[in-house]
């Protein structure tokens, strides 16, 4: 989560100091956002584990996406991606992530759809993996979180599937300066109509899956359009899904939906500066952590800890004390216990960057330089994984964050070294933050 500061005595400078930076960026982004030339985004479908000899269910998923997910190129991998015998162990998941990301890289695709055909309950358990990893505010379906669809599913489930896949392309679309609004809006309208008048006899469990998918689509639309009404729809959809996805009935789906609800509430609370929504987000994340334990679901536990840290950080930015910021730093540190560089390097780098942001905020409210130096170390750690070639925007954001904390250090220490390093970090960020590509980030840096 990049942080921005503005100093100076001008009226505009004072305005920037009084408006939360995330809100400022979103208020202006709709007017100034640059759009790249049209790009084709690709979805790669792995053979479903346990499918029949004709791969009938895998082909059914392919046909559904070709028909519903307009504007996407649909590819077949021709191999199955499988979890190990344990299924929910961190090592099995990490191995599957690395293998799936290698497939995405080899084929130049943006999202991988994989999973298995359940023999006992006759359902398809579909999972989703992006080229950038499993993290990200708007992506609700991650490794270990499944979209369960009946075999030979109908149009209602196909709409939900296409919505999830389109929403999962979000990181690639943002990296290319593209927006998914034109593709997602028709999908959202069809899913909303389906929810308003469900097909007769549609089981409530399937309706809850469609509600959860609708929440994901609305979250992405809310983020990309900058319209809070979509985020409000996402919150309502997740809450409707939770009426069926109870902790007693389906604990893992309940926890996943609580996590996604927390992210929608957090995004809405940050945008509208509504503390009550951020408090609700914290409660939702903590609820998810009652099921996502470190022992049973270590990667999901780490991801949710990271999300909890983000909500606590947002609250801490609005409060004068340091308690929330200290809690945020503790949540990020907890996440790093399982989000290791060896296991999930991009997630590790993300959490290091977020930890640096929390430590910097704490350091600026306290005397001395210890916390600021720890923040700089966290940003530098993130840059060991975030390379300009692999993830240019994340690299530039972290260089910008490093520049911010070095500047703060330079204002407290004698000598020019930290300030000279800050200038170097800002200039590095500007190698990616160009006026043509990201005008707001260029101007801030």
Image: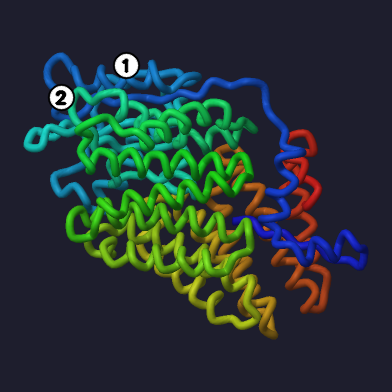
- Left/right of residue 290 with respect to residue 353 in the rendered view: left
Which quarter of the figure has residue 398? bottom right
Residue visible at 41% across and 52% down in the picture: 260
**Which label belongs to residue 415?**
none
Q: Nearer the viewer, residue 263 or 237?
A: 237
Instruction: Give SS at disc 1.
Output: helix
- Left/right of residue 15 with respect to residue 189 in the rendered view: right
Instruction: Give SS at disc 2.
Output: loop
| Measured Cα–Cα span from mark 2 to mark 1 | 16 Å
Q: Eyeballing the image, is 81 above or below 296?
A: above
Neighbours of disc 1 within 10 Å: few (<14), some (14-19), many (20+): some
Scheme by which the image is coloured: rainbow
> x, y percentage for residue 236?
43, 51
Q: Residue furthest top?
A: 54
Contact, mark 2 vs mark 1 (Cβ under 8 Å): no
Neighbours of disc 2 within 10 Å: few (<14), some (14-19), many (20+): some
Mark 2 or mark 1, which has the lower sequence index?
A: 2
Q: Nearer the viewer, residue 282 or 437?
A: 282
Q: Eyeballing the image, is 317 above or below 160?
A: below
> x, y percentage for residue 167?
46, 36
- Left/right of residue 10 with respect to residue 240 in the rendered view: right
Residue visible at 35% across and 42% down in the picture: 211
Which residue position holds label 1?
Answer: 63
Q: Quadrant of the N terminus?
A: bottom right
Is residue 285 visible in the rendered image? The answer is yes
> x, y percentage for residue 277?
52, 64
Q: Nearer the viewer, residue 194 or 367?
A: 194
Which residue position holds label 2?
Answer: 51
> x, y percentage for residue 266?
52, 59
Is residue 339 visible in the rendered image? The answer is no
Q: Eyeballing the image, is 355 above or below 116?
A: below
Residue visible at 22% across and 27% down in the picture: 48
């Amino acid at each position: 989560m990049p942080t921005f500061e503005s100093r100076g005595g001008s009226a505009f400078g004072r305005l920037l100091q009084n408006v939360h930076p995330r809100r400022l960026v979103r208020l202006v982004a709709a007017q100034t956002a640059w759009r790249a030339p049209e790009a084709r985004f690709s979805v790669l479908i792995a053979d479903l584990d346990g499918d029949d000899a004709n791969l009938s269910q895998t082909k059914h998923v392919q046909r559904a996406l070709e028909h519903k997910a307009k504007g996407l190129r649909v590819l077949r991998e021709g191999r199955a991606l499988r979890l190990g015998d344990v299924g929910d162990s961190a090592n099995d998941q990490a191995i599957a992530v690395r293998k799936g990301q290698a497939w995405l890289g080899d084929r130049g695709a943006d999202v991988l759809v994989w999973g298995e055909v359940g023999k006992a309950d006759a359902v398809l358990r579909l999972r989703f993996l992006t080229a950038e990893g499993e993290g990200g505010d708007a992506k609700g379906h991650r490794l270990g979180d499944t979209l369960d669809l009946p075999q030979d599913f109908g149009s209602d489930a196909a709409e939900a599937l296409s919505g999830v896949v389109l929403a999962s392309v979000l990181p690639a679309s943002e990296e290319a300066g593209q927006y998914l609004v034109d593709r997602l809006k028709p999908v959202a309208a069809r899913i909303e109509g389906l929810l308003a008048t469900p097909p007769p006899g549609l089981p409530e469990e399937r309706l809850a899956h469609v509600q959860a998918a609708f929440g994901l689509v609305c979250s992405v639309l809310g983020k990309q359009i900058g319209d809070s009404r979509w985020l409000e729809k996402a919150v309502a959809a997740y809450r409707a899904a939770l009426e069926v996805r109870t902790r007693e009935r389906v604990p893992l789906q309940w926890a996943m939906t609580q996590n996604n609800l927390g992210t929608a509430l957090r995004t809405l609370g940050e945008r509208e500066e509504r503390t009550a929504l951020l408090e609700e987000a914290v409660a939702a994340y903590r609820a998810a952590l009652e099921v996502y334990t470190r022992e049973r679901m270590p990667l999901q536990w780490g991801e949710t800890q990271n999300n909890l840290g983000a909500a606590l950080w947002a609250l801490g930015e609005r409060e004068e004390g340091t308690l929330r910021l200290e809690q945020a730093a503790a949540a990020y540190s907890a996440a790093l216990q399982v989000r290791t560089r060896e296991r999930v390097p991009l997630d590790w780098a993300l959490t290091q960057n977020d930890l640096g942001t929390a430590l910097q905020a704490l350091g600026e409210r306290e005397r001395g330089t210890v916390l600021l130096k720890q923040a700089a170390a966290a940003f530098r750690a993130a840059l060991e994984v975030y390379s300009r070639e692999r993830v240019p925007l994340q690299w530039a954001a972290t260089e910008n964050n490093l520049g911010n904390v070095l500047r703060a250090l330079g204002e407290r220490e004698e000598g020019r070294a930290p300030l000279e390093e800050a200038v170097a970090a800002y200039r590095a960020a500007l190698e990616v933050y160009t006026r043509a590509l990201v005008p707001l980030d260029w101007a801030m840096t």
